[in-house]
Amino acid sequence: MARMVILTGAGISAESGLPTFRDPKGLWARFDPMDLATPEAFERDPAQVQAFYNDRRAAARAAQPNPAHLALAQLQRARPGEVLLVTQNVDDLHERAGSTDVVHVHGRLDEARCNSCAHRWPAPARMAAGDRCPACRSGLARPSVVWFGEVPEHLDEVAEACARCDLLVVIGSSGTVWPVAGLVDIAARAGAQTIEINLDPSVRAGAFDRVLAGPASVRVSEWVAQVLDGPFNL
Ligand code: OAD
C-alpha cells in the first residue's frame, strides 16, 4: 500500500476562475497583503478585511471544481486510505469535487472563528466588522483563514505524513510561502519520490525529482490516469 501526500495551491483553482496570489493578475499583484491578510490589518480596519474575504467567499461559492480537482477525488476513491490531500487553498473545491478528509493548512472561507476564544462556526455569506462570537459573545468574528504571521494549521500532522510517505506531489503552488514550501525537503530527506505539477517550474522546482509543467486540468488528469493505469511506479 502506497502512501501519497498531495499538496495543492492556488494554481489548481485557477482554471475554476479563482485568481492565484502571485501571477501577474494575482491577488497580491492588485492588493497589498499587509492591508488585508494580517492580524494587525484586522485590528486596524476589520471592515476592509471582512469585505475582501466576503468577495473571495462569494467567488469561491460561484466557482466549480475543474478536471484537476475531479481527478484527485477519483484517485482518493480508487486508493482508499492511501492519499492524504493537503491544500493551502481556502476554497472548498476539493470537497465539492468529492474529496474527503481534506486538510486545510491555511484555513477555509466557509468557516468563521472567534478572535479571542477557540470557537469556530459555519461562516455566513457576508461577515461584518462588528460580528461577535456566538459562544463567548465578546470576541470579534473573523474569517477562519491563516494570515501572515500566523502558524499554519495541522502542520505537525502534515509534516509527519511527508516524513512517512512514498510520494509527495505538489500542485499549483509558487513554493514561496513557508513553512509549507519546505515540506518537499522533509519528504525528499525521508526517501520519498517528489513531483511538482505547475504551469511553469516554481522557484522550488530544483527540490523535486520530476517537474510536470502545464495547466493543472491537463497535467493532473494525465498523471492520475497514469497512476490508476499501472502499478504504483512513478
Ligand atoms: P501562488 O499564487 O503563490 O502560486 C500559484 C502557482 O500556481 C504559480 O506558481 C502559478 O504559476 C501556478 N499556476 C497558475 N495557474 C495554473 C494552472 N492553471 N495550473 C497549474 N499551475 C498554475 O499561490 P500559492 O502557492 O498557493 O496564503 O500561495 C501560497 C499562499 O500564499 C496562499 O495559501 C496564501 C498566499 O498568501 C495565505 O493567505 C496565508
Image (tube, rainbow, N blue to C red):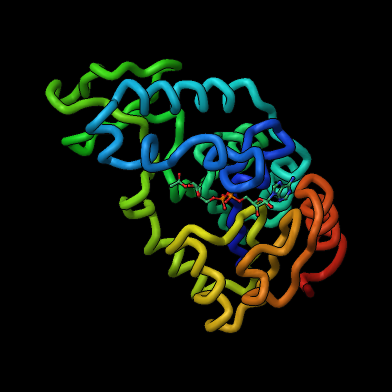
| Residue 106 against residue 227 in the figure, above or below | above
Can you say which quadrant of the picture contains the C terminus? bottom right
Q: Within the image, what quadrant is residue 117 found in? A: top left
Q: Residue at x 58, y 27 (%)?
A: 60
Left or right, residue 134 beside residue 108 = left
Q: Is residue 210 visible?
A: yes
Q: Residue at x 75, y 73 (%)?
A: 210
| Residue 133 against residue 230 in the figure, above or below | above
Nearest the camera: 234 or 180? 180
Q: Looking at the picture, how far across and down is residue 208, in whole percent? A: 66, 74
Q: Within the image, what quadrant is residue 126 found in? A: top left
Q: Within the image, what quadrant is residue 154 found in? A: bottom left
Q: How many marks?
A: 0
Q: Residue at x 65, y 46 (%)?
A: 23
| Residue 122 against residue 229 in the figure, above or below | above
Left or right, residue 191 beside residue 105 = right
Q: Looking at the picture, how far across and down is residue 20, in whole percent? A: 61, 42
Nearest the camera: 212 or 3? 212
Can you say which quadrant of the picture contains the N terminus? bottom right
Q: Is residue 1 visible?
A: no
Q: Residue at x 34, y 29 (%)?
A: 112
Q: Looking at the picture, how far across and down is residue 89, in whole percent? A: 53, 43
Q: Looking at the picture, how far across and down is residue 64, in whole percent? A: 69, 28
